[in-house]
Amino acid sequence: MSQIKDIVNRQREYFYSGETAGISFRLNALKTLDKTIRAHEQEIFEALKKDLNKAPFETYMTEIGIILDEIRYMSKNIKSWCRNRKVKTPLSHFKSTSYIISEPYGVVLVMSPWNYPFQLTIAPLLGAIAGGNCVILKPSEYSVHTSRLLSRIIGESFDERHITVLEGGTEVNRQLLQESFDYIFFTGSASVGRIVMEAAAKQLIPVTLELGGKSPCIVDRDAKVDIAARRIIWGKCLNSGQTCVAPDYLYVHREVKKELIEAMKRYITEFYGEDPCNNGEYPRIINERHFNRLRTLMDRGTILAGGNVNTGTLQISPTIIDHVTWEDPVMQEEIFGPVLPVLEYDSISEVTAEINRHPKPLALYLFTKNRPVEEEVLRNVSFGGGCVNDTIIHLASSHLPFGGAGASGIGGYHGKWSFDTFTRQKSILKKSTLFDIKLRYAPYGNKLKLLKKIMR
């Protein structure tokens, strides 16, 4: 406990020295991080192979490349983001100028999950660095090899007063949440998110919560079915379904259901072979507890594809399940694995109504060529973000904020939104001292009529 408190105190002292505030310091830190990632690329590949059996291609696409692109974007734009922003001043404040300063919070805590243990640790770190903060990173204890690597390479590259990685489990998390951070950024499950928010509320610490939920995927009868099938299977099976924005369940129009399912089965085989559970490039489930949880979700309904497991490697083949209802266990919780339940529909309005009866999802995916259907879904359903005619890829853009809605999250980040998340907007009005209009001062007498004219 005292060790964590000492780290927080040293970081706060370092922050108040003003060292992290300079733009050149922030740019150099981003540059250092870029060099560190490139220098340790092979070790990152190896750590993620051990933790999740990720192939180098998938690791680079979803963990490394997206981060390097974000560093480039931030490095290019940070100077403009840090400038004071002038705004209009009401006539009633004549003669004055008004502007907004983006100031860092101070010492921030970033708690990251195990499913994308490198990317989801470093992505918020970039925003915290760009914002001028000191940072304590707490990666997941489940992705032990990646967490250990992060601790080592960050420790070798950065002053611990600026950035510190703390490993450990629940007890370390509990101790951290007792500290008086200036901001907390958490990515993980809704259940743990509630614990984080409760702890933060006790000390009035602002938070960003990146959670999850059951993200629907809708295939309309006017969709290009073959493309839909390919992109759905890619998005669902990426990281073996252990993606917070993975298509959680499928709503397909009755007229194209059979065609879509056959196409999805074909792409499962094309991507992962006849036996995905023995494919060296197919990711595994993170641990035995999650593996067993997923196995129980396949007990109800009719398995149309997959259903095979490898207890030795903790792999579960991509599985499509038909004849499920909202009362079945697979529809009661976020699946977070390569299991895709299928529901059918006749009218898009019944789909939107059903989705709206449940907590707001983190993502939504719609496949259609019908513009009115697209407009109806996007207008009537609230969700964090999503795609029309694709899956997942909206989160890989520095030009779009990524975050949830309602129970799926609070706040957003990526690109400029990461900088905004880790800075607060300080309002300044600078008044001239050349003269002083006495209207506002007592005694008020008959000044009301003039005041109303000015403030009209």
Image (cartoon, rainbow, N blue to C red):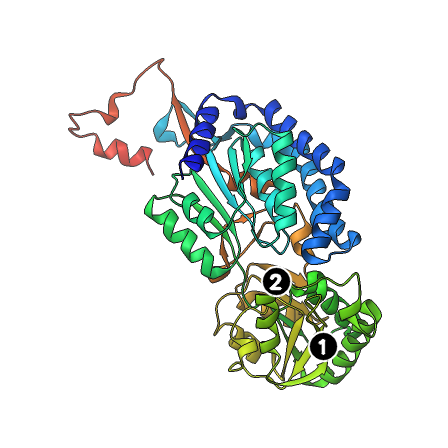
For image coordinates 46% across by 32% down, the residue present is: 7
Q: Secondary structure at mark 1?
A: loop
Q: Quadrant of residue 218?
A: bottom right
Relative to 60, 403 lies left or right: left
Q: Is residue 68 above or below residue 186?
A: above
| Residue in the image at 33% along x and 15% along y | 435
Gap between marks 2 and 1 measured at Cα: 17 Å
Residue type beneath disc 2: Asn
Q: Position of residue 279 (x, y in %)?
A: 80, 66
Residue at image position (71%, 65%) is: 313
Circle 2 SS class: loop
At a point 42% along the width and 30% down the height, the residue shown is 9
Residue 180 in the image: above or below residue 276: above
Circle on res. 308: 1
Locate the N terminus and report the quarter of the image it occupies: top left
Outermost residue on the top side: it is 434
Where residue 91 appears, as percent x and y from the top left, is 38, 30
Q: Quadrant of the C terminus?
A: top left
For mark 2, does the 10 Å Cα neighbourhood hold few (<14), some (14 to 19), or many (20 or more) residues? some
Of all residues shown, which one is farthest toward the front? 312
Q: Nearer the viewer, residue 367 or 298?
A: 298
Closest to the observer: 5 or 343? 5
Q: Amino acid at mark 1?
A: Asn
Q: Is residue 445 left or right of residue 85?
A: left
The x and y percentages for residue 206 are 41, 44
Residue wearing tag 2:
287
The local crowd at label 1, few if under 14, some if 14 to 19, many if 20 or more residues have their Cα within 10 Å, is some
